Amino acid sequence: MNKKLFPAIAFGLLSLLAVGGAISACTGTSAEAPDKSDVEGRIEALLSQMTLEEKIGQLNQLTGVGCQPARIQEIRSGSVGSILNEVDPDTVNALQREAVENSRLGIPLLIARDVIHGFKTIFPIPVGQAATWNPALVEEGARIAADEASSVGVRWTFSPMVDVSRDARWGRVAESFGEDPYLSGVLGVAMVKGYQTDDLSQPNTMAACVKHFVGYGASEGGKDYNTTWIPEPHLRDVYLPPFKACADAGAATFMCSFNDINGMPTNADKHLLRDILRGEWGWDGLMCSDWSSIQQMVPQGYCRDLKETAEKAANAGVDMDMQSFAYIGHLKELVEEGKVSEKTLDDLVRNVLRVKFRLGLFDNPYVDTATARRFFTASNLDASRRAAEESAILLKNEDGVLPLKPGIRIALAGPMMDARHDQNGTWVFDLEKDSTVTVLDAMKEMYGAGRIIEAQGLGFSRDKSSAAIASAAAKAKGADVIVYVCGEEAVLSGEAHCRTDLTLPGAQKEMLARLKATGKPVVTVVMTGRPMDITDVVANSDAVLYCFHPGTMGGPAIANVLSGKVNPSGHLPVSLPKASAQQPLYYSHKNTGRPAEGITLIDDIPLEAGQTSTGCTSFYLDAGDGALYPFGYGLSYTDFSYGPVVLSSDRMATDGSITATCEIENTGSVKGSTVAQLYVRDMVGSLCRPVKELKGFDKIELAPGEKRTVSFTVNASDLAFHQADNTLAVEPGDFKLWIAPDSESGDAKDFIVE
Ligand code: NOJ
């Protein structure tokens, strides 16, 4: 029965149907037309009409099961606030109609989906997008994802993930922007803007969900869902800043993480969720749990039963329960017993309603099925290709083997050369894999099928069968150059897909060695979901192009880079290790009291050498120290020279700023882009400081012979860090500053903060 008596309808559907503002504001008691911009007023008006059950219903998120009668009944009774994983526009509209027309208050549903790096048109996985160091491109990708997904009714995506990820074993590094808090924050904000635009109420937007709050990337041992130990000053310096940046940019929602921090599950952490997020940051969005993360406080050993998990999560400030059934099952009882106050409950409901109002769902709840399915447009595919091109990182290029010379015969080998599914990476629920263009497709198109010798050799990345390797190598020998496309299948990274061995799986190393033995130049393309140990790959390849899973247009993008049509400009957003066990690995480490020097490697140690013979400094006997390729690194087909850094002053007040400039010249013969990176080091602090911290970057394109001066303003506040008592302070003292194309090069410039 249709009971359009209440404010949601008055503000929503009826206003849609009966434009002119003649409709009574809510219950019929007010003659005033609602002020649509008064979101808080609308929330209060609606809240005042809600029963306890209806309030709790708004906090309940369920996964999609289509239009099953039981689900329809739940929606009509007002016990569902949000549905995830429903992507058919007709179903979305049908469910929405039940909520809007057939529930007592007509409150629309929030339809959610994991749209992580594209909906239908797939972009590079987020760590690949981070390799572009191009916020505009990241924003464009998110805009396109929102346009495609909202066209079927998805108005809430669980993205961006801004977990700082410093352990390559952790499968979710694929979904991150890498190891650096600053880069993660800048790119997280770009994604939020792309999804939400400046006007979230437009029907082609999605509310962003910044996740996972917080510290999840520090999962012990790089094993998913594991515990984390993070002292609060470190949490505030490293893990919280990207979330803060996204909150400041207006991110509509956040998601709680699965981990506990120092023994406290984040889903129960009042200090994090209330004091810091709502209190210090003043954020007023919606905090949802992760999938059954409220319930998981039982196996975590923090709560006795589901009821207690609901009490802890609600009191901590988790607004929406994703699939734990803890709120719907127990909140009523908890409120009646006084264990969760009505005020607390109302605040949770307010946060949910606020997002629905901001999304314009009360005014326009339905998908326009006439314009539904805006997928794979030429411009969307073009943007996906550009993102994949800019995410490709050239790590090695000996004797100028790249770009490939015109007119040559190319052997294409390896398990990822034609991986229509796998080149799209993790989190592609809505993939239409036949739309993917592989490297094989693109190389045939570019060079003509007659010039491409197919020598795949291995069926998939984990393939251990060497049976076809010898014949593939024999075929490849007939080419002028071999392009070996190897890596990891999509399923080897992402949630719950962690690895301890970071080298190429299966028989891929063996195959590369066989290809190398042909004597032909070998160009290796590594297509992967994480930073890998590619020591052997580098040794056996003349050139190495590192590509995180590049998405729909990965093939053309890689072909364009290999051929030189596009000059590679990706830079690493992570450190590549020299050995799998060298984890966690990140450039911004502490110096230690005995930084690595005089490294003696295992095979150089004399027999019966004395205990101190290798020198007593901080390194591994079998891997030395540092990265195989450092954070920020990436080559080009041209060369850049970075001039000396010039400071506007070598002294800065604790509330002042200075400008750092550097002239960069393209000294090669082709146009190309470099990423100028600004790093600083605080030499002495009241807590030990990292050896370098990224504070800015600028990706610039230069024609051959062109020079440009990049300029960064360094504010004293950029140099602040959290003290032992968790307050933020700028400490006077000596600093160093670099402007360089990666985290290991460049000459330091000194300045003093006083
Ligand atoms: C669990 C994952 O941790 C989270 O990132 C995702 O958004 C939810 N499941 C919903 O699928």
Image (cartoon, rainbow, N blue to C red):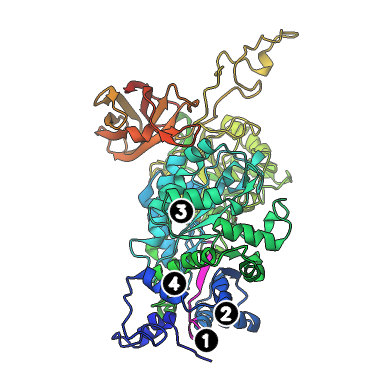
Q: Earlier in the sequence, mark 4 or mark 3?
A: 4
Q: Which residues are magenta?
A: 100-114
Q: Earlier in the sequence, mark 2 or mark 4?
A: 2
- Residue at the outermost front position: 338
**Residue in front for this viewpoint, 358 or 561:** 358
- The image shows residue 572, relative to residue 119, as above or below, that is above
**Residue in front for this viewpoint, 369 or 536:** 369
Quadrant location, the N terminus: bottom right
Q: Is residue 105 magenta?
A: yes
Residue named by callout 3: 278
Q: Where's residue 100, x and y in %? A: 48, 82
Q: CA distance from mark 2 to mark 1?
A: 8 Å
Q: Where's residue 77, x and y in %? A: 58, 82
**Kind of residue indicated by mark 1:** Asn
Asked if the residue under mark 3 is in contact with the one under mark 1, i.e. CB atoms within 8 Å, the reply is: no
Q: Nearer the viewer, mark 2 or mark 4?
A: 2
Q: Earlier in the sequence, mark 3 or mark 2?
A: 2
Q: Secondary structure at mark 4?
A: loop
Q: Where's residue 442, x and y in %? A: 48, 54
Q: CA distance from mark 1 to mark 3?
A: 34 Å
Residue 42 sits in quarter:
bottom left
* 430 lies left or right of 502: left
- The image shows residue 452, relative to residue 38, as above or below, that is above
**Kind of residue indicated by mark 3:** Arg
Q: Earlier in the sequence, mark 2 or mark 1?
A: 2
* 701 lies left or right of 220: left
**Residue in front for this viewpoint, 158 or 603:** 158
Residue named by callout 4: 151
Residue 418 sits in quarter:
bottom right
